[in-house]
Image: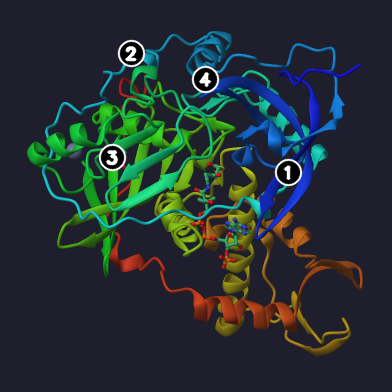
Amino acid sequence: MTLEVAPGCKLMVSKQLGHDFSYHKAEVMAVRVSGDAEEYYVHFIGFNKRLDEWVKVSRMDLNTIEAPANNNRTNASVKASGGTSAVTNKKKAGRKRASLLTVPADGTCETPTRTGSPSSLHASDQTGLASKMTESQEDLVLNQEIEKLRRGGSMTQRIEEISRVKNIDKIEMGKHIVDTWYFSPYPTELCGLAGDSTIYICEFCLSYFGAKQNLARHRQRCPVFHPPGNEVYRFGKHSFFEIDGHKQKMYCRNLCLISKLFLDHKTLFYDVDPFLFYILTENDEQGCHIIGYFSKEKESLDGYNLACILTLPQYQRKGYGRLLIEFSYELTRREGRVGSPEKPLSDLGLLSYRSYWAEAIIRALKTEHRLETNPEPIMLDMDDDGLEQKSSHISVSIDHLSKITGITTEDILHTLQAIDALKYRRGQHVIVIPQKMLKDFEKIEKKCKVRIESKCLQWTPPVFTAAQLRFI
Ligand code: ACO
Ligand code: ZN
């Protein structure tokens, strides 16, 4: 008996990874008719969802087809509904908020904005290769998500409930055309207006359009050339703008819609009031072009210092994620606190944080070492064979490290364990940083072009009254 390719069934599908094509097991999520042929939306098992795609039957090995498992996880509909899921979760969480589905169809900001954006094109590059997740990692994320339905406006969704089919292929923003990764609840009438599913976005006010000519018309009357809010930091050609979600609702909602295109497992988009947004820009004579952002709860009862973080794909792997994270900890230190990012982290979020934490801890240890404040042992230099070569001892408690870095003691301990630097020696815990790691660290330091210049931050922690923090 030959099985029909239908949503829920699994089979081997060829996929290009790097330069090579190879077969990988995939689950069929949806079917559509394109021209006179059918196309299938497939999820490659064990790979991040951003590699999901529409494929023709010619890429499938029909001999490997497996019938759908008997469960209700399949989603045969092409018009999936992330927005509805948001509302469902919101109801579950017992909160009544305006749904983003009520934003104007063209997403235009109340504030008109200005003309003029360069037109050269740049395609984004995202392979997702580095982010292959094991099933147990996916399970872990899922369990954490179920546990952690957010009390605040930052929405966490169950993997089964979220929309499984990408609705927008590309976004065009300024001079960049970028492939999207995930579903985002843009109004359905805008998707595919110009014959493709590209959304055209004003890079300064983030208004969005279904057709290029509509964006062009908007650009002629759009007067803004930087994000709204206060510029709280400027160093070289980079700035940070602080935006209150309550005051700049439309900008922040539009930002969250963009963010959802690249963030699968959580985002906030219907409820921006409880958050501040910090937008990183690259500045030139045309204006301040958004590179990425992070959001932060005005008051986090969980001690989170960052809710969502995004570097737009055209700027990724250039050190900006690190810069955003460093900035978030700079704010936390100014507040005299310690903080941690909201969980769960995405795969890329975890990679970036792990790398930042390790670097920040080693830098702090080196600084303490230079200060030579204490004589007690804590850091040992080892040779490559793991034998103690020369010992360079300082005494520093995890609490102290936490205070000077703004990183929580839990994150410090996890990081030290992850990099295998926490050892038990002669009856006490010591941090052992091998020579090789120190050398790698020095290389990273040299390579790191963008850094936060603390003195360029003109900022005092905003204070909100109890009434201002009452969002319901
Ligand atoms: N593969 C392997 N390592 C990576 C990758 C990747 N694709 N991306 C980041 N890293 C690690 C590397 O160690 C990297 O340092 P290196 O380039 O020197 O090797 C380090 O993280 C920092 O990289 P940056 O260039 O500073 O980070 P980037 O600007 O690319 O931004 C970010 C990282 C924000 C996570 C980006 O990938 C992104 O926006 N992803 C989509 C949204 C997302 O997942 N956000 C995090 C969600 S969790 C939360 O919001 C709390
Ligand atoms: Zn605009």
Quadrant holding ligand 2?
A: top left
Q: Residues within 10 Å of mark 3 (few under 14, many from 20)?
A: many
Distance of label 1 from label 3 (alpha carbons):
45 Å
Question: Helix, strand or loop at disc 1?
Answer: strand
Sequence-wise, the earlier of marks 3 and 4 is 4
Residue 458 in sight here:
no
Question: Label 2 amino acid?
Answer: Thr
The residue at which mark 2 appears reads as 102
Distance of label 3 from label 4 (alpha carbons):
26 Å
The tag on residue 243 is 3
Distance of label 4 from label 1 (alpha carbons):
28 Å
The residue at which mark 4 appears reads as 82
The residue at which mark 1 appears reads as 14
Sequence-wise, the earlier of marks 2 and 3 is 2
x, y (%) of residue 131? 67, 50
Question: Label 1 amino acid?
Answer: Ser
Tell me the mark number nearer the camera, choosing from 3 and 4.
4
